Amino acid sequence: MREALYVKLNKRPGALALALAGAMLLSACGGGDDNGSGSGGSSADGGGEFSMYIGDPENPLIPGNTTETEGGQVVDSLWTGLVNYDNETNEATFDGVAESIESEDQQTWTVTLNDGWTFHDGTPVTAQSFVDAWNYTAYSPNAQGNSYFFSNIEGYEDLQAPEDENGEPTGEPPAAEELSGLEVIDDQTFEVTLSAPYAQWPTTVGYTAFYPMPEAFFEDPEGFGEQPIGNGPFQAEEPFVEGQGITLTKYEDYAGEDEAQADAVEYRVYTEQNTAYTDLQGGSLDIVDQLPPDAIVSAQDEFGDRYLETAQGDITSLGFPTYDERFADPNVRKAFSMAIDRQAISDAIFNGTRTPATSYVSPVVEGYRDDACEVCELDVDEANRLLDEAGFDRSQPVDLWFNAGGGHEEWMQAVGNQIRENLDVEYQLRGDLQFAEYLPLQDAQGMTGPFRAGWIMDYPVMENFLGPLYSTAALPPAGSNTTFYSNPEFDEALAEGNSAGSVDEAIEAYQAAEDILIEDLPAAPLFYRLNQGAHSDRVSNVVIDAFGRVDTAAVTVND
């Protein structure tokens, strides 16, 4: 899932549940009296209201079109999927809507639902609720950003609008409106047939794209996006207001095990991260899940056990617009990558809390290699040799893009200074767009130079750091491939990993795909991180998981 701010599955399904090795999850509990923040109080039996910082979501709150962290945080409070992910192990757990997900051949999966689940409008969650939602998201005329996640289900290609030999739409409708690989058996059961075996498929379906939708959505998708109807622990009794946010209230008929402890959560939109942090310090905001870089050291002393630090399944990269003539040559992209001293930036700006990236894959995911990317290491002489070999025009400055208000300017300026010093290329910072404006410009091939690209895993599988960002099937609007990279050899290696009969075989194929990616380098991996957050003493049991989300249902408002 595309990340807005940098400093911002009862029984396990056997061997299919992939644990994230080394994930650190620290929660802090605070006590004391109400400090007079803008949130309501509570009783000893729970309840109360708390507030949390977010940036403006890119799109209306529809799971199939929510591909970034800000909207994703809200959507996760409103919905519960087939499986959940354990806050400590990150394994898929069957305490969601699914009772079981079973297969004899790893290609045809039978999904059985638990009874008793309802949407916030009181209608039941059925097998049809999932099938209808998945068909809608996969159907290309609906232009849903999460369409790519259904590309391995049989019949997906038939739901894509025809294109001519140049890859341009012909204007004709898709051949079908429903995935042939989905079949409703009864109200509590549906069958999913994949285009090839995928042993890890049950682990993926806890992601936002796979949430169910009520009939009300299909009657008025636009209105639904403003005031969604989910099946999660919180409900929306009022519309989301752009630039302001939304207050969600506890859903009393929630069927899950982890019901909301608070009566309400106010998601408060800030355009500047520093402003949110100041409000947290002043007691008028309860949770900030990503701290400004310059606050990290002092926050540990200021907040004590209310300071949170979590190992993230993430990566921050410098994306290259491969559609731009200046960056079409892989040697140019490698040169820029080798001109960046990642460790120096981490030490100077992030106080050593950022680890230089050596792979396209996060270290917390099985299959990560700490020596995968040689061109991610500083080598000024080789960088200049490659740039000369490519005939790059050094007389023209390069634009460096990042979203405003997220604490990125200082480290992006450091990247620019290193490019200037090591490559003799001037730069211009382009950080004037808010996140909700920045992502659509990426999707529209509007980047005129290297750009900040942040990604937090959707599910704990190596493929999630490769396919959604770099496969041909994930080109916008179907996915998040904003470098617009496309290589059939990479796609083929990725497909081999998806269809592998075991986790070990899958990892071997994914690593082969990553090797192709490193040779082409559509983006330069920069950093992995520990996420730093903090909360007021009005709330306790605050956990930021490895997906970068706060488990809002677990948050307790203190007396």
Image (cartoon, grey):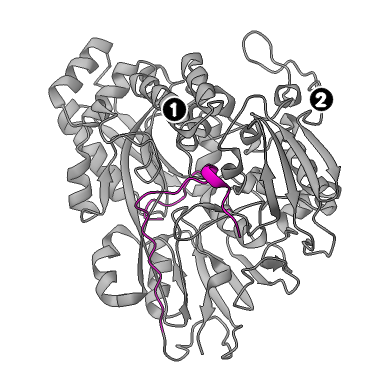
- Amino acid at circle 2: Ala
Where residue 413 sits, quadrant-wise, is top left
* Distance CA(mark 1)–CA(mark 2): 31 Å
Measured as percent of width and height from the top left, residue 465 is found at 45, 36
Using the image, tell me which numbered label, if any, was put on residue 510.
1
Would you place residue 131 above or below residue 426 in this image? Answer: below
Relative placement, left or right, of 306 versus 344 is: right
Q: Residue at x 61, y 60 (%)?
A: 10
Measured as percent of width and height from the top left, residue 507 is found at 43, 30
Q: Between disc 1 and disc 2, whose residue precedes?
A: 2
* Magenta stretch, main secondary structure class: loop
Relative placement, left or right, of 150 versus 386 is: right
Measured as percent of width and height from the top left, residue 135 is found at 76, 36
- Amino acid at circle 1: Tyr
- Residue span colored magenta: 1-30
Q: Residue at x 33, y 50 (%)?
A: 529
Would you place residue 322 above or below residue 357 in this image? Answer: above
Using the image, tell me which numbered label, if any, was put on residue 176.
2
Q: Nearer the viewer, residue 374 or 365?
A: 365
Relative placement, left or right, of 483 versus 132 is: left
Magenta stretch holds residue 389:
no
Measured as percent of width and height from the top left, residue 63 is found at 66, 48
